[in-house]
């Protein structure tokens, strides 16, 4: 029996006929150039008025799916397939563009893409070189782990109790007194920031930060309508915070020890100052402390260790000190905040990997973690020296920097504002990847965050020579009228 439209359907006869014709084209039964039956034949076949057929064909012609030549009839148009595919596919671009989360900056998308290319020299990567990861020891320690059946089920909202106990003991050695109830295990420090962004703020809240800030390169807060305000920590800080805060909810985000990207290390005085100022104004602090264990000199107490009023949310992670791939970090804070963040984490991922949590517990409790830190700092220190020697030989006349005090980075400041997107792309063409200052502060055209932690010494040297050549030629070009 030939297809016929349903007379008493809620879909009009014309629409049903349009669907039927497009189905014939999409299934390939009516290829490009197929001549359609006449209007009279179609009206007869579908048992409808000729005018209904005429309107359906007109609509398909207007969409470019059919075409007609006077006197020859109506045909399936050349481009009909593409047009139909577009018509039936959802407009994903619109979904993407109108969604809540901001995309990465284009420069960061390029960095993420080219970090996967083996021949590229990575002068900016904020990660330990694979040769600095204690892979063999990690593998070996897997054999010492003992699991109970329930360990392979979903984790508890706050994460493994054994790990939280081990952390509260470990943090005590670093001057932070806390208990397992005040610790939340997260899948890396980045997740801690994301949980805070969704769990603690209303739209229009204010996050204070340094001018050059890691947060500007990732957008966890910006995506939820939270305003980022960069402030200077000078003698007017209290006034500045008060004015910029207005009556809004606010928080101060900082990486006070071995800052990313600047490598800055605050003195204890500076930490006390910020703590007291924020306490006065009732502004909580997020202390992102993922690099502090990599300080080459003796530890400086964290802001959290000064916290007697539950004002500081402290973030730590093993990503920079042991392995970013295990995805283990932690938040220390007042119980209501920890419970709130744990509740959101359960809605997001039902807890962090059981194996990773067990492995990190073993490393913390066996002393392996602290022993590894000692070795790692030695390696990082000699890498830092290696890069600083090259800088002294080559870059003295065009840039300034401070000797690294730990962690991964040297904040290289060019005397001229040459670090633009064009400069980034020029280096990429020569297979050298940098982290330009403008991803941490959009106004900054002078800095590069150099990382000595990732590339091999050979690559660091090669990359720095290319960086020097491109810097010189950019400076020369900008001088010629
Ligand atoms: C300051 C800072 N906070 C947080 C993170 C995120 O670390 P994780 O790998 O633990 O998510 C990074 C990573 O580069 C960082 O530099």
Image (cartoon, grey):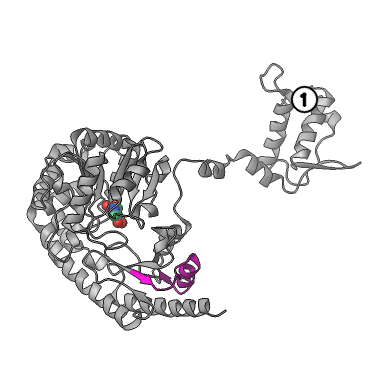
- 432 in relation to 346, above or below: below
Residue at position x 40%, y 76% from top? 467
| Residue at the extreme bottom | 393
Q: Secondary structure at mark 1?
A: helix
Residue closer to the observer: 313 or 109: 313
Residue 417: within the magenta?
A: yes
Q: Position of residue 438 (x, y in %)?
A: 42, 61
Among the 4 quarters of the image, the one containing residue 56: top right
* Quadrant placement of the N terminus: top right
* Quadrant placement of the C terminus: bottom right
Among the 4 quarters of the image, the one containing residue 72: top right
Residue closer to the observer: 309 or 286: 309
Q: Is residue 59 left or right of residue 191?
A: right
Among the 4 quarters of the image, the one containing residue 140: bottom left
Residue closer to the observer: 381 or 74: 381
The region drawn magenta spans 412-434
| Residue 99 appears in the picture as rendered | yes
């Amino acid at each position: 029996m030939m297809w016929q439209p349903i007379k008493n359907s809620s879909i009009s006869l014309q629409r049903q006929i349009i669907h039927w014709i497009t189905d014939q084209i999409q299934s390939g039964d009516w290829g490009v150039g197929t001549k359609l039956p006449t209007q009279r034949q179609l009206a007869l076949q579908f048992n409808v008025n000729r005018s209904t057929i005429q309107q359906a064909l007109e609509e398909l012609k207007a969409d470019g799916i059919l075409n007609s030549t006077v006197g020859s009839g109506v045909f399936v148009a050349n481009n009909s397939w593409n047009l139909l595919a577009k018509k039936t596919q959802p407009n994903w671009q619109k979904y993407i563009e109108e969604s809540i989360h901001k995309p990465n900056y284009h420069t960061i998308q390029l960095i993420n893409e080219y970090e996967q290319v083996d021949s590229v020299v990575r002068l900016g990567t904020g990660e330990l070189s694979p040769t600095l990861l204690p892979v063999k020891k990690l593998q070996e320690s897997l054999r010492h782990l003992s699991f109970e059946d329930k360990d392979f089920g979903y984790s508890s909202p706050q994460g493994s109790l054994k790990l939280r106990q081990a952390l509260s003991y470990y943090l005590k050695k670093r001057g932070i007194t806390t208990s397992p109830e005040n610790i939340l295990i997260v899948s890396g420090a980045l997740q801690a920031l994301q949980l805070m962004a969704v769990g603690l703020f209303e739209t229009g809240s204010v996050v204070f930060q340094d001018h050059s800030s890691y947060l500007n390169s990732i957008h966890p807060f910006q995506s939820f309508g939270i305003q980022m305000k960069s402030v200077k920590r000078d003698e007017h800080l209290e006034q500045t915070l008060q004015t910029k805060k207005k009556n809004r909810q606010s928080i101060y985000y900082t990486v006070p020890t071995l800052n990313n990207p600047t490598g800055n290390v605050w003195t204890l005085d500076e930490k006390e100052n910020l703590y007291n100022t924020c306490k006065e104004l009732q502004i909580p602090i997020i202390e992102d402390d993922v690099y502090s264990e990599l300080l080459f000199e003796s530890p400086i107490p964290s802001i959290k260790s000064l916290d007697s009023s539950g004002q500081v949310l402290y973030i730590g992670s093993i990503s920079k000190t042991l392995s970013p791939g295990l995805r283990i970090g932690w938040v220390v804070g007042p119980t209501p905040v920890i419970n709130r963040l744990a509740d959101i984490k359960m809605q997001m991922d039902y807890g962090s990997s059981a194996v990773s949590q067990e492995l990190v517990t073993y490393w913390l409790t066996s002393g392996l973690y602290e022993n590894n830190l000692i070795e790692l700092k030695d390696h990082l220190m000699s890498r830092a020296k290696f890069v600083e020697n090259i800088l002294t030989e080559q870059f003295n006349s065009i840039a300034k920097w401070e000797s690294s005090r730990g962690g991964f980075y040297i904040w290289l400041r060019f005397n001229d504002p040459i670090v633009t997107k064009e400069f980034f792309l020029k280096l990429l063409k020569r297979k050298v990847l940098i982290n330009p200052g403008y991803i941490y502060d959009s106004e900054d055209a002078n800095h590069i965050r150099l990382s000595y932690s990732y590339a091999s010494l050979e690559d660091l040297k090669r990359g720095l020579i290319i960086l020097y050549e491109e810097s010189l030629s950019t400076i020369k070009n900008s001088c010629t009228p």
